[in-house]
Amino acid sequence: MIKKIDIATWERKEIFEFFTGFSDPYFGLTAPVDVTKAMKHAKAKGKSIFALYLHACMKAINSIENFKYRVIDGEVHVFETINASTTILRENKTFGFSFIHFDSEINVFKKNIDAEKERIQNSTNLFPPVNSLDCVYCSAIPWVNFTGHKEPVLGKEMETVPKLAYSKITEENGKYSMTVSLDVNHALIDGYHASLFFTRFQEFLDEF
C-alpha cells in the first residue's frame, strides 16, 4: 500500500523544499552496534548472523515513518512496508541485487533471503525481477572493519531510498561489534530520525 503526502499541509514542507534544491542533499552517519546477543544466538542455534542482523535492521527501518518516504514524479509518498535490497555475492565474486520481502516473522524472512540467494547464484542478472522503491539498499562488507563509508549516487534525479552498509564483525573481550553506515536524503530524514534508527536497531539486536 502507498499513500501520497499533501506537501502543502505537510509539517516538513519547508524542510523538503529547502533540501530538494541542493545538488547533494544527502548525509550519512557511521556508528557501531553491539551484536553480542545476536552472535551468541546465531552460534547456539546454528543460524545466519546476516539474517539475524538484517531482520533487526529492517524492523528498525519499518518502525520509523520517515524511512518509508519516497519521492515519485516530484511528489512524496509513504509506503506501508519497506523491504531489503541487498547485494549478494556469487562464487565468481560478482554480485546481484536482491529484493527480499520483509516479514516480521524471522523464519519467513529467512526463507525470503534464501530464495533470493538461490535466484542470484543461478543467474547472471544484476537486477532482481522486482526492483521498486519500497526498499532500502544494503551492502555487507564483511572483510573490513570500516569506520567511514560513502555510497555512490546516480545523479540523474533525486534519490530517496536509504542506503546501508554493514562492516566486518569484530570481537573484543567477549563483546561483538559491527559498524553500520547509513546514507539518507535530508529532504525526508533528519539527524533525529537517523539517530532513532540506530537506537531502534540496537534495541532489536538486544532482543535475541
Image (cartoon, rainbow, N blue to C red):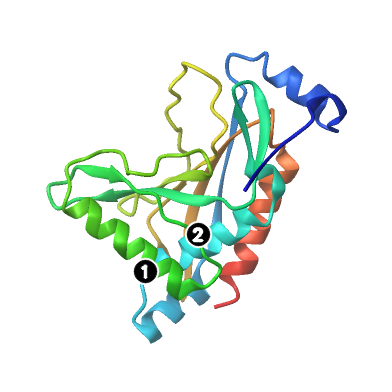
Q: In the image, 146: left or right of 97?
A: right
Q: In the image, 188: left or right of 124?
A: right
| Residue type, label 1 | Lys
| Residue type, label 2 | Phe
Residue 24 image point, x, y percent: 58, 19
Residue at numbered disc 2: 102
Numbered disc 2: secondary structure: loop
**Residue 62, quarter of the rendered image:** bottom right
Q: Tag 2: Cα neighbours inside 10 Å, few (<14), some, or many (≥20)?
A: many
Q: Is residue 44 above or below residue 164?
A: below
Check residue 111 in the rendering and tell me which mark sits there, or answer none: 1
User: Residue 78 or 139: which is nearer the viewer?
Assistant: 78
User: Residue 81 or 181: which is nearer the viewer?
Assistant: 81
User: Residue 90 or 146: which is nearer the viewer?
Assistant: 90
Residue 191 image point, x, y percent: 71, 39
Kindly identify the residue that appears in the image at 29 percent across and 51 percent down.
88
Kindly identify the residue that appears in the image at 47 percent across and 58 percent down.
178
Check residue 88 in the rendering and tell me which mark sits there, or answer none: none
**Does residue 140 appear anywhere in the picture?**
no
Give the position of the C terminus as an image quadrant: bottom right
Q: In the image, 3: left or right of 95?
A: right
Q: In the image, 201: left or right of 50?
A: right
Tell me which label, 1 or 2, sits earlier in the chain.
2
Numbered disc 1: secondary structure: helix
Q: Is residue 118 above or below residue 75?
A: below
Residue 177 image point, x, y percent: 48, 63
- Residues marked 1 and 2 touching at CB (< 8 Å): no
Q: Tag 1: Cα neighbours inside 10 Å, few (<14), some, or many (≥20)?
A: some
Q: Furthest-left residue in view?
A: 92
Kindly identify the residue that appears in the image at 67 percent across and 13 percent down.
21
**Does residue 157 appear anywhere in the picture?**
yes
Q: Is residue 116 above or below residue 105?
A: above
